[in-house]
Amino acid sequence: MSAVDLAPQELRTVVAVAEEEGFSAAAVRLGTTQSSVSHAVRGVERKLGVVLFERGRYGARPTPAGERAVAHARRVLRMLEALVVETRGATDAGEAAGPLRIAAFRSAALYLLPPVLERLAARHPGIEATVTVVREIGPGAAGEVAEGRADLGIATVGTSAAVPPGLVGDVLLEEPYALVHPAGHPRPRSLPLVDWRENCSSYTRSWWSAQDWIPAATVRAEDDGAVLSLVAGGLGMAVMPALSLTGAPPAVEITDLGPERPTRRVGYVTTPELAATAVVRALVRELRAARTMAKPQLSGV
């Protein structure tokens, strides 16, 4: 297959159309005209030999090929940005600098990342870190990285593969689940179950289905913080991972589920190309240091 030459501006145009869901809005974002955007997209489609967008009254939506093209375009543009920063000597003295986009699920963003980012800022004040909280459902934080919207994701990782295909990373910690219930309740396992969508995944489902004392969820909450509030209010019990229980209110009691308790693996993921950049390497070093400090805290509840 012959090589295809795509200019950075062509990649920016494709990304803008996908994110703005239309040619007119993309033109406003890029400071150009709708006809210029349409012409540029048609040029990219001719070069690639595929249709990237479905056009209609609703705007423009990426085709399956378009979705892949947009993800690659974001990643290429991010590497061009890293090229500029790192070749201008920002890291000559061992100090990383530049933007760093992080995606994380809620409890990791609240309790795992803050001390890590504090140490990162002290060592590398030139890094401009931003954190996006994502639901750990479906692609989750790893999907943000694969789609080029984040440089590094803090994600839950499965037991069969440490990280999703096409990405690189490592497990940071394995957190146990525990029973959470109103403090002082004489029969906590008799209470209704409070749960949220992100809680039960493949690594806990087999354990969960084997527990005849756990009923179907009576109350569904938006996130783990809401679950804790409902349990503290006496509305039920919950089975939750350790990160979600950080700073649990005194009105709840946490009971160990024993040696067969389920666990959840939390790790970081990034792309192979971004793994070599100074900003991602600096963050990974701090995450690994945090892993060492967090192990005693998360070994039990």
Image (tube, grey):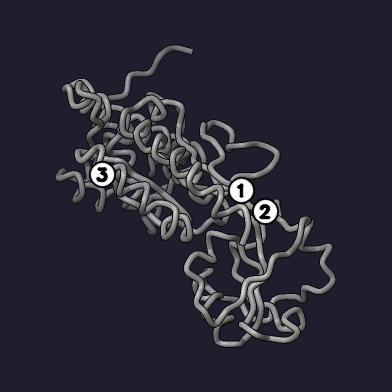
- Measured as percent of width and height from the top left, residue 28 is found at 19, 51
Considering every residue shown, the one lying at the far top of the view is 2
The CA span between labels 3 and 2 is 31 Å
Contact between labelled residues 1 and 3, with CB atoms less than 8 Å apart? no
Instruction: Determine which of the numbered discs, if any, sits on residue 174 in the image.
Output: 1
Discs 3, 2 touching: Cβ within 8 Å: no
Upstream in sequence: badge 3 or badge 1: 3
Residue, disc 3: 121
Give the residue type at disc 3.
Ala
Q: Secondary structure at mark 2?
A: strand
What residue is rendered at 39% in x and 39% in y? 286
Verify CB contact (< 8 Å) between mark 1 and mark 2.
yes
The residue carrying pointer 2 sits among few (fewer than 14), some (14 to 19) or many (20 or more) residues within 10 Å by Cα, namely some
The percent position of residue 288, horizontal first and vertical second, equals: 46, 38
Q: Quadrant of residue 236?
A: bottom right
Q: Nearer the viewer, residue 195 or 166?
A: 195
Q: Amino acid at mark 1?
A: Glu
Quick one: label 1 or label 2, which is nearer the N terminus?
1
Q: Can residue 109 be seen in this snapshot? A: yes
Q: Which residue is mark 2?
A: 263
Question: Which percent across, then down, holds residue 252?
Answer: 58, 79
Note whether 284 is above or below 16 in the view shown.
Answer: above
